[in-house]
Amino acid sequence: MKTIPQWQLRAAFARRLSERYGREVPAYTTLVDVSREVNEDVLRRTGADAERLGSIERVTAERHGAIRVGTPAELQQVARIFGALGMVPVGFYDLREAAASAVPVVSTAFRPIEADELARNPFRVFTSMLTPADPRFFDDDLRARLENFLGRRRLFPPELLELADRADRDHELSEVDAERFLGLAVGAFELSAEPVDRAWYQELEKVSSVAADIGGVSSTHVNHLTPRVLDIDELYRRMSARGIEMIDAIQGPPRWAGPDVLLRQTSFRALAEPRRMREADGSVTTGALRVRFGEVEARGIALTRKGRERYDELLAETDRRSSGHDRAEVAKTVWQQGFPDTERGLIEDGLAFFTYHLREDRPRRGPTSLTASWVDARPIVYEDFLPRSAAGIFQSNLSGAGTRDNTREGAHYDVARLSGVLERDIHDPYELYERQQNATVEQLMDERT
Ligand code: OOG
Ligand code: NI
């Protein structure tokens, strides 16, 4: 009997979601087309350099998505579904603190963690869970009604979860089960046709449009899918030229002459989509909600903790110097002064992760160092997210800032609590990169002795 391994389930899931999203959000199709064009141009212009951070096949198929759920039980089910696809939780993001607007969620990202799995298909999903227990956003009465509403809904059919557990356990599914699993899984993340209770939605929206998007409806949905592009500035220009209004900035490090690090992202607001609404008198009408958007990203080299601290300092320095000036220009200057402009500089200062390999032409004996000419250093791609950029993306797509009462103490969430909810370890991204790097360093040292 033919079976489908996990990585093929993951690739098929990403492809089907993408096809579905493109049919429903036409600007997304434009984004994917323009990304492909830009990537082909970069490949033509720069040859092998274009593939330094991943093969063109990987980059072309690469997507991340984002979903939001309401309760620990829902998050736990999401972990089972992504577990089936070989995706595990990595990193903890507290967007309540990162955002100026009301974004009452904590998040993790589900993704593959082994280098060969990432090379096959790196699909990742940024996943946020609502925090109704945070009194800065929800008073006792609203919290009780919200938790009651969330407790009654069912996001995922039992059959989907059973198939997910089977795939997680066996690392594969039969062809028939795979088809069934993929159909149910894609369906579970679609926008629902179920009428939205207008009064309830609006009540939550006053607090936070993210809260309304999560707790005002009876299902979850993918709120954006993000292709990867090799030149995000060029993409930004081409999208704007096609009349698609992008947010006013590219989030993350600036465009500059040095190596690309971490992640640069930008997005556009999707149009309002018609939705069925249930009115106070019980009648069903047609309204509109703007809950889906588009985003695109360029990925760079993963930074060490030290590199990340440097990045955060440069960002803060840019903020300080920016008022009244062009932020992108200021950022470029700040980076030129504060960040190595070559990969070798990054290695010497211990700021970024690489894998290290001996070249053919190495001398037979003698000590080696990671910057020796016979050592080939290959950058490790940043596979994760940035809380400040995520908050920026959230914010630029909200309908209003919402409200928060900062005189109250926030509910405490951390990685340990979220991992308890998930009943799984949440991987530390730094440890994953370091493990990958160190394995090659050890091998290199072995080969030299
Ligand atoms: C998630 C926003 C975070 C990113 O790329 O940083 C994100 C959301 O809007 O639910 O996807
Ligand atoms: Ni995103």
Image (spheres, rainbow, N blue to C red):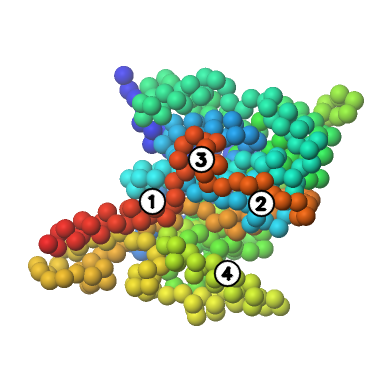
Label 1 with label 3: CB-CB less than 8 Å: no
- Relative to 374, does residue 300 appear above or below in the rendering? above
Q: How far apart, in angstroms, are the residues tagged by discs 2 and 1?
A: 26 Å
Q: Amino acid at mark 2?
A: Arg
What residue sits right under mark 4 in the picture? 315
The crowding category of the residue bearing disc 1, from other C-alpha atoms within 10 Å (few below 14, some 14 to 19, many at least 20), is some
Where is residue 357? Give x, y as percent: 23, 60
Label 2 with label 4: CB-CB less than 8 Å: no
Where is residue 351? Give x, y as percent: 41, 67
Label 4 with label 1: CB-CB less than 8 Å: no
Q: Amino acid at mark 3?
A: Ser
Q: Quadrant of residue 354?
A: bottom left
- Relative to 144, does residue 393 appear above or below in the rendering? below
Q: Amino acid at mark 1?
A: Leu
Left or right of residue 301: residue 98: right
Q: Which mark is residue 432?
A: 1
- First-in-chain label (4 vs 1): 4
